[in-house]
Image (cartoon, rainbow, N blue to C red):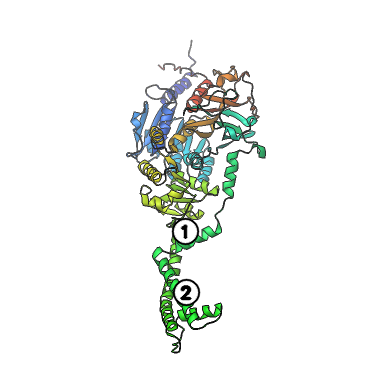
């Protein structure tokens, strides 16, 4: 075939530009980059690394990582770049130009925002997945970038910890087109409102996730289901009613006054005041009787005047009355300074108690939250929103949630939760539950064990990084719930990078289920297949279907319905199942053909 001399320069230019955009080794897989400095960077990288061999993954971390972050070099096929700053130079050296997506999961919102601006200068068409704790800032960041997903690992994990502390199911409500769904126990939902089963327990300790529809009579009341929120009183769950009652609970005024008085006086000063008042009362009674004072008011009048030193010497009184008057005058000299000291100390101690929660020894039925970082602060807010009494513990007086605790009137004990005296000051033995969510696994475990020693039946909700370690701790020490925040959040971050439309993450048992909408692309294996092909037991459950070009969702779609390009399938899936479904909905990659330039 003759070469058109007019088109030949254009062809060579296109071939040259295409070659420059490919890696030197000719790898055509999409490139993903993850930047972080704590446990979340590892779990997100692990999720992406296990997504198959169709992506290239680069992880940018500081030269020194925290000790609780596993060795990233153990992940196969992951390139590791160490850098002090996330700037344009770092991103260019990491090969960000031409990358498909970038996840910024640093534990600092400002660092992530600055890195996002630098990354956009290197690759304008980049998909950004940004970790943000501040929800207001996250909303502004989402509007700043064209292709951006803003996620909060703390927001994802906090409801699970709150629900575990109350012995309830995590109150996960997901708004979908035309309906709201939530997680509940089977016994709390009407059968017609159940969408699908999330877990089924066999009674012997084994829990199946996303099981097949159980046969009639095989259901257990404790099975977790995904249900439709109808908004009608008849559809309100028992768990929701318990939460409503919790919101309505308020502190009793007399109990609050008693706690304030006990907080205002130290033990020694209080005893001194009580003894002096007792001596004054006894001496006044004797004086009034010996001096033949008639009437209660005159007795009180003579007693108080004598106590403050206003009595005259009475030679005509009998010896008993004179002795009583003498003792009463001396007691009055001691009483006035004690009252002054009690008022001053009470004002100081009351301010300290409100600001730091230094006196909480008389509390009961409250929830103790250890660690006021990102997760702990959100747990604190949600518990207070439910009307529950909370006591917080943190090592640092300037912790992220310290000001939040002060604003909400929550006592904050500054100390090491691993020490027994710190837990005693929080009245952990009379508390309803202990939620330990600091970032130190050793401190968390020690606090949990010390609390259990003080009260063996205490409900303990424990945060640990390593998922296997958390499972073993839960079994060995009978800890009620032990969870890893990064494990709960990582699937959502990874799914957002892969541009899957993840609508929510639901923590179920020790798994994280994803609610997502997957679009069927032309030429994919699902194009022309029946809807039932997308449903897999213990992996993917189809809950709805939206036809191509339509916004309406059919929540009772016929499994025999033939799929076409553009259809959107709404599913609840495990991360591996969602990955497989996306592959089914995506056409197989075509080999890149390059004409050899002369």
Q: Secondary structure at mark 1?
A: helix
Which residue position holds label 1?
354
Q: Give the label on residue 499, or none.
A: none
Residue 374 visible in the displayed image: no
Tally of marks: 2
**Is residue 388 visible to the viewer in this orientation of the structure?**
yes
Residue placed furthest toward the top: 1
From what the image shows, is residue 558 above or below residue 456? above
| 117 on left or right of 532 | left
Instruction: Count residues near mark 1 (Cα–Cα under 10 Å), then give few for <14, some for 14-19, many for 20+.
Output: some
Q: Nearer the viewer, residue 387 or 525?
A: 387
Find numbered disc 2 in the image and state the secondary structure of the residue it sits on: helix
Q: Are marks 1 and 2 in contact (CB under 8 Å)?
A: no
Q: CA distance from mark 1 to mark 2?
A: 34 Å
Taking the view exactly as shown, the residue that stands out farthest to the bottom is: 315
**x 59%, y 33%: residue:** 187
Residue 137 in percent (x, y) is at: 51, 45
- What is the quadrant of the C terminus in the image? top left
Q: Quadrant of residue 356?
A: bottom left
Up the image or down, 559 lies above or below 333; here it is: above
Residue identifier under label 2 = 281
Task: Residue 247 in the image: state x and y as whole percent.
Answer: 57, 48
Viewer-nearest residue: 20 or 374: 374
- Residue 161 % position (x, y): 48, 41
Neighbours of disc 2 within 10 Å: few (<14), some (14-19), many (20+): some
Q: Earlier in the sequence, mark 1 or mark 2?
A: 2
Residue 574 point in image, percent of width and height = 50, 27
């Amino acid at each position: 075939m003759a070469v058109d001399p007019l088109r030949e320069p254009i062809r060579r230019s296109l071939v040259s530009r295409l070659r420059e955009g490919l890696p030197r080794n000719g790898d055509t897989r999409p490139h993903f980059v993850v930047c972080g400095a704590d446990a979340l960077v590892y779990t997100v990288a692990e999720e992406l690394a296990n997504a198959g061999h169709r992506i290239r993954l680069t992880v940018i971390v500081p030269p020194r990582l925290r000790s609780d972050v596993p060795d990233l070099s153990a992940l196969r096929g992951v390139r590791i770049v160490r850098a002090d700053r996330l700037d344009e130079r770092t991103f260019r050296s990491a090969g960000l130009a031409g990358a498909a997506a970038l996840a910024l999961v640093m534990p600092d919102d400002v660092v992530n925002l600055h890195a996002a601006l630098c990354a956009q200068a290197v690759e304008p068409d980049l998909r950004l997945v940004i970790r943000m704790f501040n929800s207001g800032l996250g909303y502004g960041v989402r509007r700043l970038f064209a292709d951006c997903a803003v996620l909060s690992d703390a927001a994802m994990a906090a409801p699970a910890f709150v629900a575990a502390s109350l012995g309830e199911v995590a109150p996960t409500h997901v708004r979908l087109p035309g309906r709201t769904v939530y997680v509940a126990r089977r016994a709390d939902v009407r059968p017609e409102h159940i969408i699908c089963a999330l877990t089924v327990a066999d009674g012997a300790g084994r829990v199946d996730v996303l099981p097949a529809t159980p046969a009639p009579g095989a259901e257990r009341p404790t099975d977790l289901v995904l249900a439709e929120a109808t908004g009608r009183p008849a559809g309100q769950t028992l768990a929701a009613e318990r939460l409503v009652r919790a919101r309505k609970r308020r502190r009793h005024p007399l109990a609050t006054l008693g706690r304030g008085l006990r907080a205002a006086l130290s033990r020694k000063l209080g005893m001194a005041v009580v003894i002096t008042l007792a001596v004054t009362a006894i001496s006044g009674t004797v004086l009034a009787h010996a001096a033949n004072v008639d009437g209660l008011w005159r007795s009180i009048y003579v007693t108080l005047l004598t106590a403050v030193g206003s009595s005259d010497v009475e030679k005509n009184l009998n010896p008993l009355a004179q002795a009583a008057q003498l003792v009463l005058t001396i007691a009055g000299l001691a009483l006035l300074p004690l009252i002054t000291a009690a008022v001053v100390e009470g004002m100081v101690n009351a301010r300290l108690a409100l600001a730091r929660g230094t006196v909480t020894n008389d509390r009961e039925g409250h929830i103790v939250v250890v660690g006021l970082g990102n997760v702990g602060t959100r747990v604190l807010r949600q518990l207070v929103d439910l009307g529950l009494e909370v006591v917080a513990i943190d090592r640092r007086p300037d912790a992220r949630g310290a000001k939040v605790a002060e604003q909400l009137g929550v006592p904050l004990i500054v100390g090491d939760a691993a020490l027994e005296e710190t837990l005693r000051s929080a009245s952990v033995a009379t508390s309803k539950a202990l939620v330990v969510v600091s970032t130190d696994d050793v401190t968390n475990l020690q606090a949990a064990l010390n609390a259990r020693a003080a009260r063996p039946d205490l409900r303990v909700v424990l945060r640990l990084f390593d998922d296997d370690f958390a499972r073993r701790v839960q079994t060995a020490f009978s800890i009620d719930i032990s969870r890893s925040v990064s494990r709960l959040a990582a699937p959502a971050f990874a799914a957002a990078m892969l541009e899957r439309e993840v609508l929510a993450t639901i923590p179920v048992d020790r798994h994280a289920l994803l609610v997502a909408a997957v679009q069927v692309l032309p030429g994919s294996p699902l194009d022309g297949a029946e809807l039932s092909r997308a449903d897999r037991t213990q992996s993917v459950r189809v809950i709805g279907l939206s036809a191509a070009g339509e916004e309406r969702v059919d929540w009772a779609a016929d499994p025999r319905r033939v799929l076409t390009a553009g259809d959107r399938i709404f599913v609840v899936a495990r991360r591996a199942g969602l990955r497989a479904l996306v592959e089914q909905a995506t056409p197989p990659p075509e080999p890149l053909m390059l004409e050899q330039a002369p």
